[in-house]
Image: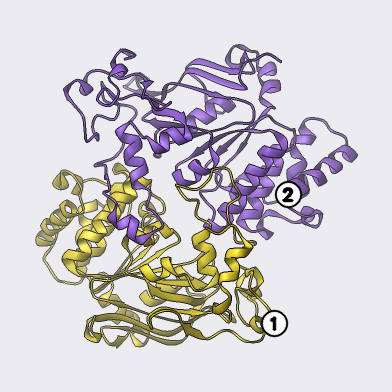
Amino acid sequence: MTESSQILAVEGLTTRIGVNAVVDGVSLAVNSGEVVALVGESGCGKSLTALSIMGLHPAAARIGGGSVRLDGDDLLRFSEKQLRGIRGKTLSMIFQEPVASLDPLMRVGEQVAESLVVHGVASKSEAESRAIDMLEKVGIPDPAARARQYPAELSGGMCQRVMIACALIARPRLLIADEPTTALDVTIQAQILALMKELRREIRTAILLITHDMGVVADIADRVCVMYAGRIVESGDVASIFAQPSHPYTRLLLATIPKLSGTRKTRLNAIEGSVPDVSDWPVGCRFRTRCPLADDACEKMPPDFSVSGDDTHRAACWHIDRLSEMDAMGEMA
Amino acid sequence: MSDAPLLKVEDLRVHFPIRGGWLGGQVGAVKAVDGIDLTIEAGETVALVGESGCGKSTAGNAILGLAPATSGRILFEGTDILTRSPAERRGIRSNMQVVFQDPVSALNPKLSVGRLIAEPLTIAGWDETAKQTRVDELLDLVGLTKAQKSRHPNEMSGGQRQRVVIARALALSPKLIVCDEPVSALDVSIRSQIINLLIRLQEELGLSYLFIAHDLSVVRHIADKVVVMYLGTIAETGPTDAVFDHPTHPYTEALLSAIPLPDPEAQRAKAALILEGDLPSPANPPAGCPFVTRCPIRIEKCASVRPGLADTGHGSRAACLVKVPDASLNAAR
């Protein structure tokens, strides 16, 4: 992929709530037609990263530094008015809770058409006919009739399709999807993932997908960034991350998933404890309090990225050379 | 004690009336559970799986007495609960407890952990010293420390809260625990901690679980038997290995195929069977096979004949006229 196809480039993004940097120097890039997954447990700062990129972070949060370049323009320098000019047009987002994110008092067709009308791309009547086409494209049967209905008349899966239609109608350059299938049943999840793949092929939208489901990552992502306690701890190509996870956290995340072929009723691998509260993030490597490989070195300094395998796969761990010890410690398959 | 299984449910139906018309009379019924059978032996885990709206939680609630059964029998150790007086039911039902999905709403935020766990003991009339001994025992059993007794739910992590909910469910030494999506609200890493706890408690205490879930990889790991529900009826049931290794009903196949494998190569190579559309309304189910509207292999008679469960030849039973010809012999209506 050439440099020119890069759509989003985030460098050293830091977002603080009070004195705590909840997003702490995050860098990532998404190319045209590419899906980059941002994974990690709740409380890792994934959603705040997404909201900071959109300029939709809560009032209590302050951007402390870094840059967010969309096609070269630094969004962090944009005024609210400029941001409003691109949101829904070149940059859009879908949220986890489709039902809560749609306006219950507005017909779904109007909601899908809204961004075209607001941005002055199309007249109201033209926008509505394009909304019906878009509803059809996301797989809503009888789109003309559905467009006249309200969100409460649709199922959860259909509302999520409507959200996707809203987000994609203006053919954005970048789509941020925050846990788009987490609230849905597996059969509907499979429909939505198939739809996202098809739309990516067709519209060449770059997608930043936030999820904690490694199965979804395996299905749709091209590259993966693993986030822990406000920092990216590992990033790389999807095949390389799954074949050779190089940060203890990534290894444990993958090992906790019960395998469909594993022995039943055995002890599952677990990561002990949970992500500490942001005010208690450890000095040095932040994962050391839950890491089986941690020693004094991890406490002294936060680890730098070292390259693992080819130069696109990086992990921030002092003990990449000792990863094989983890196999001996647990029953990691 | 007789040889009767711990719990036997026969032809359970839960219908909710739909009222309407200008006299407010009953104009129809939502057939949330429409004739299911299941058996749980002592020390066994039976999983009830299916999409949201299939009636799995309503079935669990009816067994617990939290939803009114319209007809059928619920036999606990051979005694039909539904024919007993309210006082007798309460006595029998103290042997059945429940763990819900969301530990935040299940715990009163104003009570300390010690009081929360002691609550069932207080209701059962235990004296103060016996109560304290039992609470300490329970804390130890679920992996919490005595120091956490004075904490409040908001001071704990999601995983710890779910441990409190489990400790409270265990207080009166029940024989059966209905787990309604006990790990769906938890992060992957915490999810495996709680599953490990449930497996250990079962070994130590000989508990039986009715495990209601939609995450099939977790179900495969923990369950001895699986019941797949669709629109209030059973689509397929049998030992876990039979159902997972030889799924017979097209709905079971679709459910299994929809689980994304945490392996990019295998996941992308997989020929996915993606179901079209959504679950029909249980107020107006199809006349024949409930699955007919979404079934990829339907034939003409599926629209008029409702299949019954019949042997698949793999140790499981499925209700499909195409895959299991005997299903028409057991047909209802």
Q: Is residue A30 left or right of residue A40?
A: left
Residue A295, quarter of the rendered image: bottom right
Mark yes or no: residue A2 visible.
yes
- Tell me what hue chain B is rendered in: purple
Q: Nearer the viewer, residue B29 or B219?
A: B219
In the rendered structure, find residue B314 and report the number of the disc placed on it.
none
Q: Is residue B51 above or below residue B150?
A: above
Mark yes or no: residue B215 visible.
no
- Tell me what hue chain A is rendered in: yellow
Q: CA distance from mark 2 to mark 1?
A: 40 Å
Amino acid residing under circle 2: Leu
Q: Is residue B16 left or right of residue B167?
A: left
Crowding at dot 2, Cα within 10 Å, few <14 / some 14-19 / many 20+, comes out as some
Amino acid residing under circle 1: Asp
Residue B326, quarter of the rendered image: top left
Q: Is residue B54 above or below residue A288?
A: above
Circle 2 is placed at which residue position?
A: B111
- Name the chain letter of the residue that bears numbered label 2: B
